[in-house]
Amino acid sequence: MDRLFLDANVLFSAAYRPDARVRELWRLKGIKLVTSLYAVEEARRNLDRPEQREKLEELIGRMEVLTSSPGERRLTIDLPQKDRPILLGAIESKGSHLITGDFTHFGRYFGKTVEGVLILTPSDYLRARKKK
């Protein structure tokens, strides 16, 4: 079973627009969606409309949310300090995938496995899933 750790930008996108394709992740069978309180708080801060915040709460209610902060450890890739908790959360939650739309900081790692976690965009994951 795939265990998908969702970055804040994925949560934001799913809550921001009612027709966001990324919401398909919540309809998939045979996967577990996971995120962290760190990612939830970042998504929450960036949503400005009450209905968007309500949608975010609904979506995270259907996920596992890690409430503890990931431990500090050395990573095998170079990331800005603000993105380290996302990858560390994916690793510590035993995620099979980190799903992120952050092309700036994670883009060069898309399609690569880092410490057991495959980093993909939501659309790449959905496309690969349809091929199975």
Image (cartoon, rainbow, N blue to C red):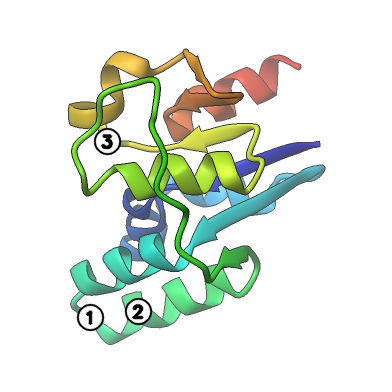
Q: Is residue 77 above or below residue 40?
A: above
Q: Secondary structure at mark 3?
A: loop
Which residue position is annotated with label 2? 53
Identity of the residue drawn at 30% across and 73% down: 44
Nearer-N-terminus badge (3/2): 2
Q: Secondary structure at mark 2?
A: helix
Q: Is residue 21 left or right of residue 82?
A: right
Kindly indicate whether the residue at mark 2 contacts the one at mark 3 (C-beta within 8 angstroms).
no
Label annotation for residue 49:
1
Tell which of 104 and 62 is nearer to you.
104
Identity of the residue drawn at 42% across and 82% down: 54
Tell which of 8 and 95 is nearer to you.
95
Q: Where in the figure is residue 88, as x and y percent of width and height?
A: 45, 43
Query: What type is the residue that disc 3 sits on?
Result: Asp
Q: Where in the figure is residue 43, as x and y percent of width and height?
A: 31, 64
Q: Secondary structure at mark 1?
A: loop
Query: What type is the residue that disc 2 sits on?
Result: Arg
Q: Is residue 124 above or below residue 12?
A: above
Identity of the residue drawn at 54% across and 68% down: 59
Label annotation for residue 14:
none
Which residue position is annotated with label 3? 102
Q: Is residue 59 above or below residue 57?
A: above
Q: Is residue 62 above or below residue 106?
A: below
Q: Mark 3 vs mark 1: give the one in front.
A: 3
Q: Is residue 73 left or right of residue 126?
A: left
**Dot 2: few (<14), some (14–19), or many (≥20) neighbours within 10 Å?**
some
Q: Where in the figure is residue 99, as x and y percent of width and height?
A: 47, 37
Q: CA distance from mark 3 to mark 2?
A: 21 Å
Nearer-N-terminus badge (3/1): 1
Quarter the C terminus occupies: top right
